[in-house]
Image (spheres, rainbow, N blue to C red):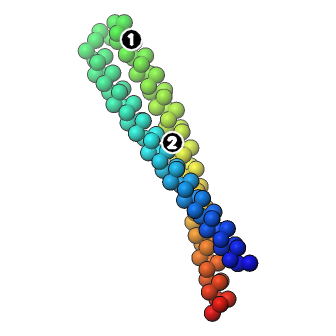
Amino acid sequence: MMMMGLSASQARQMSLLAQKNDLELTAQQINQERLRMANQTNELFNLSSNLDPNSRESITLNLRINAIQSLDKALQLQLERVNTTYKAVDAELGSIKKLIDKSIDSIFKTFA
């Protein structure tokens, strides 16, 4: 009976580890996209600094900058959700590890 519980716990642990790895990859991809957008925004700021602030080109660049900044805020919120889920998965992994350790100790006491 204890072996079944141990097997189920180990299966859950493996599932959580896979989910944790997926979340790490997602967070990394979001951060890379945010960095790319920050570089793009910086380039647009540099271009607009050489223009008359009231010119059509400057206004167009500022609109693009604002759009990129809005996308960045959405990505930031998405990253916060990923990080929150990551913390929950990590906490559950800690609980599962304790459960597995306890099951192993119990099994060894039974057969000792």
Question: Image quadrant of residue 5?
Answer: bottom right
- Give the numbered dot on residue 59: 1
In this rendering, position of residue 24 left or right of residue 11: left
For label 1, the SS is helix
Where residue 84 sits: x, y (%)?
56, 49
Q: The N terminus lies in which quarter of the figure?
A: bottom right
Instruction: Determine which residue is flagged by label 2.
Output: 79
Image position of 65 with respect to 17: above or below: above
Task: Mark 2 or mark 1: name the one nearer the start of the chain.
Answer: 1
Q: The C terminus lies in which quarter of the figure?
A: bottom right
Q: Residue at x 61, y 80 (%)?
A: 104
Image position of 15 with respect to 39: above or below: below
- Give the numbered dot on residue 20: none
Do we see residue 90 in this rendering?
no
Where residue 86 sits: x, y (%)?
54, 52
Where residue 77 sits: x, y (%)?
53, 38
Q: CA distance from mark 2 to mark 1?
A: 30 Å
Q: Residue at x 47, y 48 (%)?
A: 25
Where residue 24 sits: x, y (%)?
48, 50
User: Mark 1 is on which residue type?
Assistant: Ile
Question: Image quadrant of residue 41?
Answer: top left
Q: Residue at x 35, y 27 (%)?
A: 40
In this rendering, position of residue 56 left or right of residue 73: left
In this rendering, position of residue 54 left or right of residue 104: left
Do we see residue 14 in this rendering?
yes
Mark 2, other Cα within 10 Å: few <14 / some 14–19 / many ≥20: some
User: Mark 2 is on which residue type?
Assistant: Leu
